[in-house]
Amino acid sequence: MSAPLLRWQFDLTWSLFEVHLQRLEPEDFRWEPAAHCWTMHPDGDGWTPDFAEVEPDPVPVPTLGWVTWHIGWWWSVTLDHLQGRTPRAEVAWPGPGQATVEWLRALRAEWLTVLDRLTDTDLAAPAPFPWRDDPEMTVAHTVGWVNAELMKNAAEIGQLRMLRAAGAGSAP
């Protein structure tokens, strides 16, 4: 896959995400759409996500805040890997509201810097993340994965935002 095509795919994905980012209200971030959900918890120094190394069954429904933290986590770590930095162990979520929207937009700006400098040789290099030990996976696969993961997360955020705006009932 070529760098221009991956960039086009990312720009399309981001434009669809931006439709929802522009409309987010602070109350959207902690709205719980179900009784069994993952969310973000204030902890005195910031926010702590619900998380498990092994996904529980049934899978908890994430809040919009949790999904934005999740985007920030995987994107920050991916950026660290692709820029040769030591991947961060913790990713701080800015909290409900505009600060998180601006954080995601800043990650986008950093991602565009990475995308714009990638050559076909770079794209053919082994992927440092998220497939650590698979020699078949390349940086192009990582970029494609970022695009797909962002599209999935954008759809989740859009659905949660629209359900809340439509007045869907809160968790029983």
Image: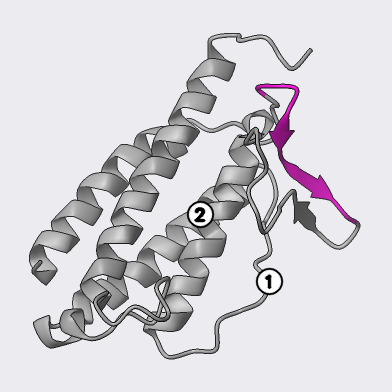
Q: Which residues are magenta?
A: 33-43
Q: Report x, y in % for residue 81.
A: 44, 82
The quarter of the picture where residue 113 lies is bottom left
Circle 1: residue type: Glu
Q: Report x, y in % for residue 102.
A: 52, 54
Judge left or right: residue 162 versus residue 123: right
Element at badge 2? Answer: helix
Real-space Cα separation, disc 1 to disc 2, in angstroms: 13 Å
Label 2 crowding class (10 Å Cα cut-off): few <14, some 14-19, many 20+?
Answer: some
Q: Is residue 39 magenta?
A: yes
- Tell me the residue that label 1 is attached to: 90
Judge left or right: residue 168 versus residue 34: left
Judge left or right: residue 157 versus residue 168: left
Label 1 crowding class (10 Å Cα cut-off): few <14, some 14-19, many 20+?
Answer: few
Task: Tell me what residue is drawn at x 55 percent, y 89 percent.
Answer: 86
Task: Tell me what residue is drawn at x 91 percent, y 57 percent.
Answer: 44
Element at badge 1? Answer: loop
Q: In front here: 27 or 75?
A: 75
Q: Report x, y in % for residue 49.
A: 73, 52
Q: Which mark is residue 71?
A: 2
